[in-house]
Amino acid sequence: MEYIVFDLEFNQSVKKKENRTNKEKLCPFEIIQIGAVKLNSDLKLIDTFDSFVKPSLYHEIHPYVSKITGIKISDISDAPSFDKVFKEFVKFISDSDSILCIWGKSDIKEIYRNASLHKLSCEKIPKSYIDVQMYASKLINGSSNQSVGLEKAVNHFGLSDSVSYHNALNDAYYTAKVFSHIYNSSMSPQLYVYSGISSDDIYGLDPYDEDSFSEACSLFVKTLNRELTKDEKNIISMAQYIKYDIDEHEIKQRIKSKKNRKKKQKPNFHK
């Protein structure tokens, strides 16, 4: 058995939301770099994959993306197309029975969404995955609901070295280090099923679905490389409701109701 630990870097539109094309709405995050490391059954690194991707949607690097990743348009303008890089990545995986390892579920979602945009089959992409961030967050915070950034996890476990962050290969390397460090037999793979539902991430997420809220938070934790504040989580939650045209009063009532449900679920050991 082999583990494919991969990471992606994305670009996004610099246009206002209302001015975006249908394609841009279907794929708000375009992959501009794929990085991966392959581990054998003993969790030893046996191969790496790294490639920039020539954009087909967004031909201008969003300033925030450039600031975070350091990627410039000159880095990707002559890179191979997504079709070519994706096919090479599939060859790198080599075995559809391999297990994907990711830092948060947003990357696996985007590899499917970008492939769908280019009408490429994901049949040979493994469906089994391990969300390393979830397990690391449980160990650090005692709960997977409080997601931690990759850099914090690396520092917490004493795994840091001279490799920088916000580069797809480097982040895959660090994710692999955390995975190897915390791995135990209870970390069973989950099955990923791509819904194919288009969304603008937060605004496309179901406000009644706890998994959707966690997915949105995970995306921001990965991007910001830090934990979210309580206020930031409330903003994300409210943004989900806004998509469904729920008024402000009902938003507050539903958030309050959600909190009350969580309180009721806590066992009372003082009875």
Image (tube, grey):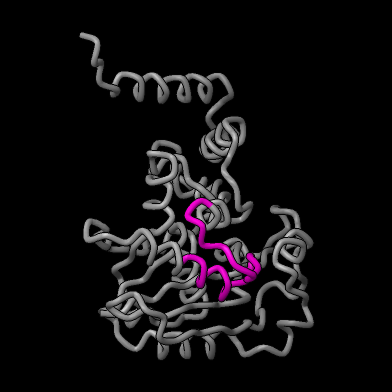
Q: Is residue 200 visible?
A: no
Please state if 152 lies on the left or on the right of 71 as rendered.
left
Numbered range of the magenta stretch: 156-175
Quadrant of the drawing holding the C terminus: top left
* Residue 29 location (% of width, % of height): 60, 64
Residue found farthest to the front: 158
Looking at the image, residue 108 lies above or below residue 84: above
Q: Is residue 186 above or below residue 24?
A: above
Place of residue 86 in the rendered image (x, y in percent of width and height, measured from the top left) = 49, 84
Instruction: Give the total number of marks visible in the rendering.
Output: 0
Horizontal and vertical percent position of residue 146: 46, 40
Q: Position of residue 166 (x, y in %)?
A: 64, 65
Task: Specify whether residue 77 is in view.
Answer: yes
| Residue placed most toward the observer, 198 or 74 | 74
Looking at the picture, tell me which residue is in the foreground, 208 or 20.
Answer: 208
For image coordinates 27% across by 60% down, the residue present is 184
Q: Residue at image x 77%, y 77%? A: 73
* Location of the N terminus (image quadrant): bottom left
Foreground of the two, 151 or 50: 151
Vertical placement of residue 237 versus 263, above or below: below
- What residue appears at the point 22 percent right and 56 percent down from the top-left corner? 186
Query: Is 139 left or right of 107, judged from the image as shown?
Result: left
Residue at point 64%, 70% (across, down):
162
Magenta-span inclusion, residue 161: yes
Q: Residue furthest top?
A: 271
Q: Determine if the magenta segment contains residue 167.
A: yes
